[in-house]
Amino acid sequence: MAEETVTGSTDLSLKRPREEEENGASATAATGEAMETENDNGTPGISSVIPGWFSEISPMWPGEAHSLKVEKILFQGKSDYQDVMVFQSATYGKVLVLDGVIQLTERDECAYQEMITHLPLSSIPNPKKVLVIGGGDGGVLREVGRHSSVEQIDICEIDKMVVDVSKQFFPEVAIGYEDPRVTLHIGDGKRTSS
């Protein structure tokens, strides 16, 4: 595998199969390795990238596997906390995967971001301050920013790589970081909220 630097606001490395460099073909998910992940109760899940496909198998969905056709792997990296991958899928646009679990897709990310943001904020008359723990992709920030009564938005994300990758590959989601009311704290949310 060759390593290249992706241009943009951050220097994030991109790994591509050597065949792409030699043949000029588009990069596909050419590794056949499976990523074993564990959920909170210690039950392993398996996600894999086989030639042309990403598959997520989770104990949350017994008897099911969720697979997406991969057109191109855009980014693969390992932060201090997790494996981070972004790929271009055939039907869902760009996909963000953390430790083998799909976190968002361009096609349907808004459904999650809108529900997790607007339902709680609509239950509070004129919210002024908002603390977001996690949410490094910036989608919740984008939605919180739509509430004009909010004066201050603090986000605490433990993994800076998630923030950087989201800004580079999902700018329409990460646009929330551009809101002047937002202050980003990189660190453990449990310590920030105490």
Image (spheres, rainbow, N blue to C red):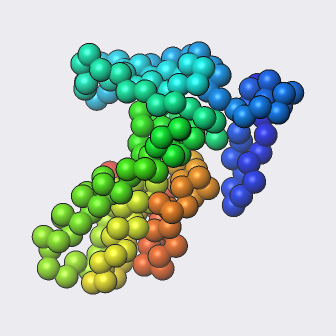
Q: Residue furthest right?
A: 22
Q: Is residue 75 left or right of residue 66?
A: right
Q: Quadrant of residue 111?
A: bottom left
**What residue lies at 51% left-to-right and 17% top-to-bottom?**
34
- Residue 124, by quadrant, is bottom left
- Estimate the x, y position of residue 66 in percent, counting from the top left: 37, 27
Q: Position of residue 60 (x, y in %)?
A: 25, 26
Left or right: 191 with respect to 19? left
Q: Residue at x 59, y 15 (%)?
A: 32
The location of residue 175, given as percent across then percent down, is: 50, 67
- Looking at the image, is 87 positioned above or below residue 119? above
* Above or below: residue 190 compared with residue 176: above
Q: For this view, does 153 lie left or right of residue 165?
A: left
Compared to residue 61, the image places residue 192 above or below, namely: below
Query: Residue farthest to the front?
Result: 91
Number of disc labels = 0
Q: Say which residue appears at 57% left-offset and 39% top-offset.
A: 87
Q: Nearer the viewer, residue 12 or 112?
A: 112
Identify the residue at horizontal 38%, vertical 52% (top origin): 109
Quadrant housing the N terminus: top right
- The reply to whether residue 37 is visible in this rendering is no
Quadrant of the rendering where the C terminus is positioned = bottom left
Residue 64 visible at all: yes
132 to the left or right of 16: left
